[in-house]
Amino acid sequence: MQDDSHTIVRTYKGSLPEIWDLWTTQKGFESWWGPQGFRADVHAIDARSGGELRYDMVAATDEMIAAMAAMGEPASHATRATFSTIEPHARIVMTNVIDFLAGVPPYTNEITVEFAAGAGTVTMTVTLPPMHDATFTKMQVEGFTSQLTKLDDRLA
């Protein structure tokens, strides 16, 4: 079986606790999550194995609101995930519930993030598995890469 996962690697100046908090606290998560033009409004974040993550993905610019409307999509949608695995300062596995796509039966999709500390840096390796089809897999990779530019800017 072919593995169609995509891996994105970034290295940031900073400490492991600082980078970890960006994934595991409401303030940190909201500060960068979501592709350019979107934001995440977190309702629950329980960063422990089995803990929940609930947030709204919100189109945050006039351009994105118009783009969503042109596609017949709402400007925001509720998102649910579980922190399937938390290995403090080392690894996160988030299981996302994909139940907001019209005409697509709900399914789950796991994102794996691994952290490695260096001398004043942290390398973050994100593995994105394929979604239900190639078009959405491409959109997932592009969207995640876009949201990482927000993290790049925040940590520059």
Image: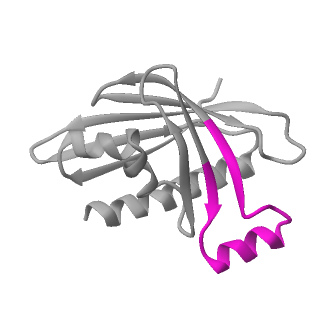
Is 101 drawn above or below residue 61 in the view shown? above
Q: Quadrant of the N terminus?
A: top right
Instruction: Identify the image's colour scheme: rainbow, by chain, secondary structure or one colour.
Output: one colour
Q: In the picture, residue 24 is in which quadrant?
A: top left
Q: Residue at x 85, y 34 (%)?
A: 105
Q: Quadrant of the C terminus?
A: bottom left
Q: Residue at x 68, y 30 (%)?
A: 108
Is 64 drawn above or below residue 129 in the view shown? below
- The location of residue 96, given as percent across then percent down, is 62, 35
Query: How many labels sit on residues?
Result: 0
The reply, left or right, for residue 58 in relation to residue 29 is right
- The location of residue 85, given as percent across then percent down, is 45, 22
The reply, left or right, for residue 134 in relation to residue 32 is right
Residue 71 within the magenta-colored segment of the rendering: yes
Q: Residue at x 80, y 47 (%)?
A: 101
The residue stretch that appears in magenta: 56-80
Is 118 drawn above or below residue 141 in the view shown? above
| View extreme (left): residue | 119
- The location of residue 60, given as percent across then percent down, is 59, 69
- The location of residue 141, given as percent across then percent down, is 57, 51
| View extreme (front): residue | 43
The reply, left or right, for residue 92 in relation to residue 110 is left
Q: In the picture, residue 52 is in which quadrant?
A: top right
Is 60 drawn above or below residue 49 in the view shown? below
| View extreme (right): residue | 103
| View extreme (bottom): residue | 62
The reply, left or right, for residue 149 in relation to residue 143 is left
Residue 90 within the magenta-colored segment of the rendering: no
Q: In the picture, residue 142 is in which quadrant?
A: bottom right
